[in-house]
Image: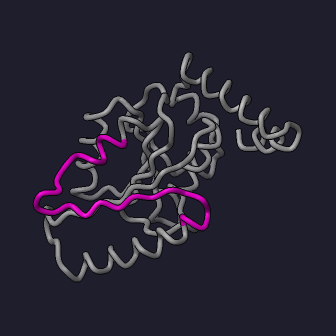
């Protein structure tokens, strides 16, 4: 937990802190954490917006937040859920954004908006110490980077916006990786559920 790590860094010197993190990571690696158990530990403001698409053991080295529609580092329940899950698991959060022209109604105007927003979000996340990656899919650059990142993650979190093609993309990712996938409503003042 974040609180435990914070107290540990105050009580122990730097070597003791690293030993604690190593032991905690080793325990997670040997025994794993079930995503349903992790979900049950989340506070109500997050769980009332979240849904589990798939479940399993949280065994990776980071929580992957697949940012698609909530292009902001503040007032973002999906990012809040990712940060809380990362704290509970003792792993960092990594944010991935991708852009492709292969979807209905893709346009230069929309893509300009996304690219400008991605640059701003990257700056905001970087100031909070959160790593990011942006993949611009194009001819010669069409590899399954999201799946690769998802396979290495302890948990994947993305926005819950029940519209095509987002629902199909989320379902396809959950079918292509054993990593648990959650969705979080980021678009409504009141939760959709």
- Asked whether, in this view, residue 180 is left or right of residue 174, the answer is right
Of residues 177 and 152, which is closer to you in this image? 152
Q: Does the magenta stretch include residue 155?
A: no
- Residue visible at 25% across and 78% down in the picture: 110
The residue at the far front in this view is 15
- Considering only vertical position in the picture, is 26 above or below 21? above
Q: Residue at x 55, y 70 (%)?
A: 124
Left or right, 112 with respect to 53, comes to left
Residue 134 belongs to the span the image colors magenta? yes
Left or right: residue 77 versus residue 68 is right
Q: Which residue lies furthest to the left in this view?
A: 139
The image's colour scheme reads one colour
Query: Residue, x 23% and y 83% (percent of image)?
Result: 109
Specify the quadrant that holds the N terminus.
top right
Residue 191, position as x, y percentages in the image: 51, 57
Coordinates of residue 126 in the picture (x, y in percent): 55, 65
Task: Residue lying at the far right in this picture: please name it.
Answer: 11
Q: Where is residue 119 in the image (x, y as percent from the top left)?
A: 42, 74
Residue 38 is situated, as x and y percent measured from the top left of the image, at 58, 33
Q: Which residue extends farthest bottom?
A: 109
For the image, the number of numbered tags is 0
- Nearest the eye: 34 or 122: 122
Q: Which residue appears at 43% of the width and 68% of the height?
A: 71
Q: What stretch is highlighted in magenta?
A: 125-149
């Amino acid at each position: 937990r974040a609180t435990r790590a914070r107290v540990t860094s105050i009580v122990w010197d730097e070597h003791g802190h690293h030993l604690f993190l190593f032991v905690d990571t080793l325990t997670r690696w040997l025994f794993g954490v079930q995503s349903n158990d992790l979900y049950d530990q989340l506070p109500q403001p997050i769980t009332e917006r979240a849904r589990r698409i798939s479940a399993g053991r949280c065994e990776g080295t980071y929580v992957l937040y697949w940012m698609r529609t909530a292009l902001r580092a503040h007032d973002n329940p999906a990012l809040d859920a990712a940060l809380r899950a990362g704290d509970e698991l003792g792993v960092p959060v990594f944010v991935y954004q991708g852009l492709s022209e292969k979807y209905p109604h893709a346009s230069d105007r929309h893509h300009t908006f996304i690219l400008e927003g991605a640059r701003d979000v990257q700056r905001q996340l970087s100031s909070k110490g959160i790593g990011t990656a942006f993949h611009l899919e194009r001819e010669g650059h069409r590899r399954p980077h999201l799946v690769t990142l998802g396979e290495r993650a302890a948990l994947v979190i993305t926005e819950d916006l029940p519209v095509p093609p987002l629902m199909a993309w989320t379902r396809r990712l959950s079918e292509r990786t054993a990593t648990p996938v959650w969705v979080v409503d980021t678009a409504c003042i009141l939760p959709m559920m």
